[in-house]
Image (cartoon, helix red, strand yellow):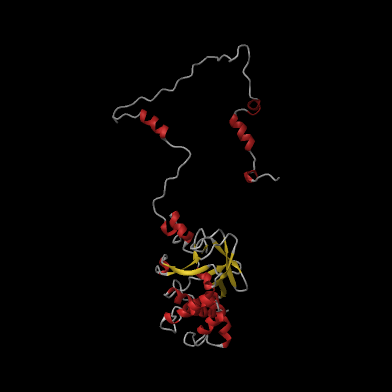
Amino acid sequence: MKPQELCDIDDLATSLVVDVFLGFNTHKMNIEHKERYKCKSHLKPVIDEFIKNQSMKIAFDSFWNQKYIPDHLFKVSYKKLVRDHIERYMGMFYLDSGFRIEPCYRYSLENKVGAKVNATSHWYKDGIIKRLVGCVAELTDKEEDEILHIGKNDFSVMYSCRKKCAQLWLGPAAYINHDCLANCKFVPNDKGTACVKVLRDIKPGDEITCFYSANFFGENNVNCECCSCEKLCKGAFKTDEEPPKLGRYNFRQTHGRTNSYRSPDKSKKVKEPRTPQKKKNVVLEPCTPNKNPEVDEGEALLGSPYTKIIQKTRGLDLDQASKSPEK
């Protein structure tokens, strides 16, 4: 799909499925989007019936109505594209989907009213959540200027380092929220789509999250409001007060010795302890009678221990030294 087609079809699918299921309007790419139906309750029976009979044909026949589909999409040429994308969202109601899009009242960027993706079954590490997919459409510079509005509909745009271009990212997987310690990641699927791979075990009820980038919410994600940042007091939850860094040593003994020489009367001078002076012309006797003390052969060759260290390290390549030897 072309970017504009993907935007229009995604807005339609989310209004027919996600918004009806959640009971409120979620984000739209068209900032002037208007629904063709007045009451969401008219479409709720379609979703309820699909959950029971699992028939996409019956559900789509109910959706494919001029009362719900905009005129420019209510054409035979768009019917398959619309059906496939609606089925991607209806996929969360399949018995084997393992996920569900649910309300989220956490993020200020969404005015505390948005959506998230929760697991409805156990997912284990390296598993693939196949029905949780997203569609990708590459954007030209011209299309970026025409489609995107900063702070309004640029929530699902990513930059491809490999292709060096911006890409639209829409579909059920676009409702996955960012987390700095995410439990899933996006992986390529069929042409133009991607699905989700599990990084660690997930229990039913856990939120499914992915890591977007290190600077998605400002430099070093300084404005990030994810659960991990809240637990670690990072991102938007970082406070000015930082806990003191603990070193290997403390000053308990030094502090006691210092106080022992300190006088409560500041005007009174306290004598510092004297350093014992060495006595001159005194020859130390060897420990063992009639036997000279043993001499360290290393010191005899290299001098003092300090000289030994200098000669040992001179000319040493530290980068090579840090590498482990080959086995």
Residue 207's place in the image compared with 270, above or below, is below
Q: Residue at x 51, y 80 (%)?
A: 8
Q: Quadrant of residue 316?
A: top right
Residue 158: x and y in percent read 53, 69
Is residue 230 among the parts visible in the rendering?
yes
Residue 143: x and y in percent read 53, 77
Residue 85: x and y in percent read 55, 78
> How many numbered markers are drawn?
0
Asked whether 138 or 264 is in front, the reply is 138
Residue 170's place in the image compared with 63, above or below, is above
Q: Residue at x 42, y 36 (%)?
A: 251
Q: Using residue 268 as the reference point, say whether residue 205 is left or right of it.
A: right
Residue sitting at the far right: 327
Asked whether 95 or 207 is in front, the reply is 95
Residue 301: x and y in percent read 66, 27
Asked whether 309 or 57 is in front, the reply is 57
Is residue 170 among the parts visible in the rendering?
no
Residue sitting at the far top: 290
Q: Residue at x 56, y 63 (%)?
A: 185
Quarter of the picture containing the N terminus is bottom right
Q: Using residue 114 as the reference point, say whether residue 203 is left or right of it.
A: right
Quarter of the picture containing the C terminus is top right
